[in-house]
Image (cartoon, helix red, strand yellow):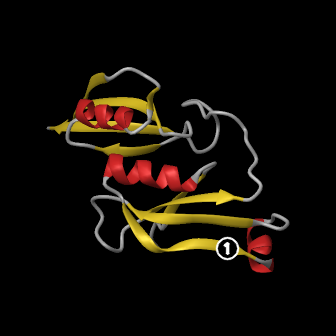
Amino acid sequence: MRFAHTNIVSENWKALVDFYIKTFNCTLVPPIRKQSGEWLDQGTGLKNAELKGAHLLLPGHGKNGPTLEIYQYNNCNDKGLPLPNRKGLGHIAFEVENVETVLKLLLKNGGSLHGKVSKRQIEGVGEITFVYTRDLEGNLIELQSWKRN
């Protein structure tokens, strides 16, 4: 068994894919997905489902690592911005060399800040620097950097 991917449902899949490529050095995994049909309806439990999107290889895991799957459905159900303490999936996290440097790049590429950069010593592990941010569509992203013991 192995972890395969995390999915983000998007309003504009092309813009969101571009954001993750430019900000986090993700790599596009061909082909571009354009899917519909009875098989998709059955698997998703939706009627007349159609989606477009792409898989992005996440940095640091090699050619066969997990992907970030960004899809745009023909009929998207909007439930508002996620919050860090909302039940269910909360955020994705990237461990980076320098939080402040990647934060500047994220903001330049259209992302936004949700929290403030914070540091904390974790006994037995080291010092973490982290902040919660948002991508172009408001999805939560944690940027974290460790100085390990």
Rendered residue at 44%/39% (across/down): 141
| Image side of residue 85 versus residue 20, left or right | right
**116 lies above or below 47:** above
Q: Residue at x 28, y 69 (%)?
A: 62
On the image, the x and y values in percent for residue 1 come to 47, 74
Q: Secondary structure at mark 1?
A: strand
Q: Is residue 123 visible?
A: no
Type of amino acid at the residue the image marks with label 1: Gln
Q: Is residue 66 left or right of residue 123?
A: right
Q: Quadrant of residue 37?
A: bottom right
Neighbours of disc 1 within 10 Å: few (<14), some (14-19), many (20+): few
On the image, which quarter does residue 106 sit in? top left
Decide if residue 2 is in sight here.
yes
| 60 on left or right of 35 | left
Q: Quadrant of the C terminus?
A: top left
- Residue visible at 72% across and 38% down? 79
Give the number of marks: 1
Residue 18 is situated, as x and y percent measured from the top left of the image, at 43, 53
The residue where tag 1 is placed is 35
